[in-house]
Image (cartoon, grey):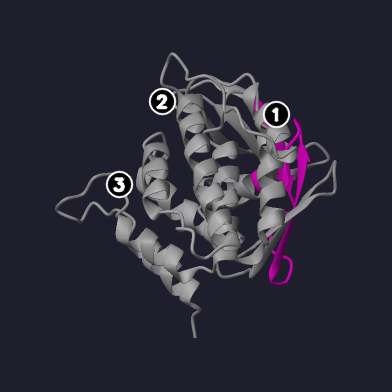
């Protein structure tokens, strides 16, 4: 039997915008499924959801490069957070800044409600508007929503709020620098120098236009074929990568977007390990 949160998550995924709807607007998620989702979560899980939503924004579209570590420092020291000045040009960092500011308010409201049930809980409309705005930045806003639900909600169920907070802080601390005003992650294959029959998954930053420019590579995944019922992927990072970002890149950019989840049905769990730091991120098969 499905847990209440699993039913609510399934409903959210089923309610992701679909072009078969007569009133279809790409990436415009209805409010009711989000409200039902929050109602199905415990107060602790709502707090964790807020932190993971922040971590997701810290991974993409990010805040500006110099602001990420400052936000991480302020959160770590439990000080007031300055999300940085509004950008002159509406780019990814501008949307990321507004989303971060709104989500910090969502988390604060969730934590007050957790401490005192008489305090009002956070509203689902905050999540709705933030991630509609972010979805519009993606190549496929509807797919973005589906992947957001499958990344963020299960993580909020399995990870306690304090640990979720640490993961969000680490994601801001690893904000990537030297990116274009609009950019995205992209996966590709790289031949193993020791064996030309083996290919590894390369993750790069690119400008998202047709024929866009590759900015730089940030890491290489290997060992992503299932062993038994588990994928034990290893990441060799080319720049500092936090655990949540590592999982995001593997789950969404490599497995879903690039490999079209060709291993679906052959695994139950994924464990990603950072070769440099030993840090791990795990998730269950969708």
| Relative depth, front residue between 206 and 31 | 31
Could you tell which of marks 2 and 1 lies nearer the N-terminus?
1
Q: Earlier in the sequence, mark 2 or mark 3?
A: 3
Position in image of residue 80 (x %, y %): 63, 33
Instruction: Count all numbered tags in the image, as a single digit.
Output: 3
Q: Which residue is mark 1?
A: 69
Q: Residue at x 43, y 68 (%)?
A: 39
| Span of residues in magenta | 216-245
Please indicate, yes or no, whether residue 26 appears anywhere in the rendered image.
yes
Q: Nearer the viewer, mark 2 or mark 1?
A: 1
Q: Considering only vertical position in the picture, is 5 above or below 62?
A: below
Disc 2: which residue? 210
Which residue is most to the bottom? Answer: 1
- Estimate the spatial distance between the alpha carbons at disc 2 and disc 1, rounded to whole Å: 32 Å
Residue 240 sits in quarter: top right
Secondary-structure class at tag 3: loop
Q: Quadrant of residue 236?
A: top right
């Amino acid at each position: 039997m499905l847990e209440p949160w699993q039913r609510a998550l399934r409903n959210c995924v089923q309610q992701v915008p679909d072009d078969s709807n007569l009133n279809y607007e790409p990436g415009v998620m209805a409010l009711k499924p989000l409200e039902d989702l929050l109602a199905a979560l415990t107060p602790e899980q709502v707090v964790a959801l807020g932190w993971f939503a922040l971590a997701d924004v810290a991974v993409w579209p990010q805040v500006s490069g110099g602001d990420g570590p400052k936000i991480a420092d302020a959160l770590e020291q439990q000080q007031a957070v300055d999300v940085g000045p509004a950008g002159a040009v509406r780019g990814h960092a501008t949307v990321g800044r507004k989303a971060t500011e709104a989500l910090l308010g969502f988390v604060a409201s969730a934590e007050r409600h957790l401490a005192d049930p008489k305090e009002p809980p956070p509203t689902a409309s905050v999540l709705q508007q933030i991630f509609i705005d972010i979805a519009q930045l993606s190549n496929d806003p509807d797919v973005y929503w589906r992947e957001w639900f499958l990344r963020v909600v299960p993580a909020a169920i399995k990870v306690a709020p304090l640990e979720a907070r640490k993961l969000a802080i680490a994601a801001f601390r690893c904000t990537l620098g030297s990116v274009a005003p609009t950019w995205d992650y992209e996966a590709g294959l790289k031949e193993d120098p020791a064996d030309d029959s083996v290919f590894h998954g390369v993750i790069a930053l690119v400008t998202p236009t047709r024929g866009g420019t590759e900015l730089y590579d940030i890491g290489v995944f290997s060992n992503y074929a299932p062993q038994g019922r588990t994928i034990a992927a290893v990441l060799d990072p080319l720049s500092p990568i936090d655990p949540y970002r590592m999982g995001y890149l593997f789950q969404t950019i490599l497995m879903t977007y690039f490999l079209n989840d060709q291993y679906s049905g052959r695994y139950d769990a994924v464990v990603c390990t950072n070769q440099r730091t030993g840090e791990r991120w795990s998730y269950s098969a969708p």
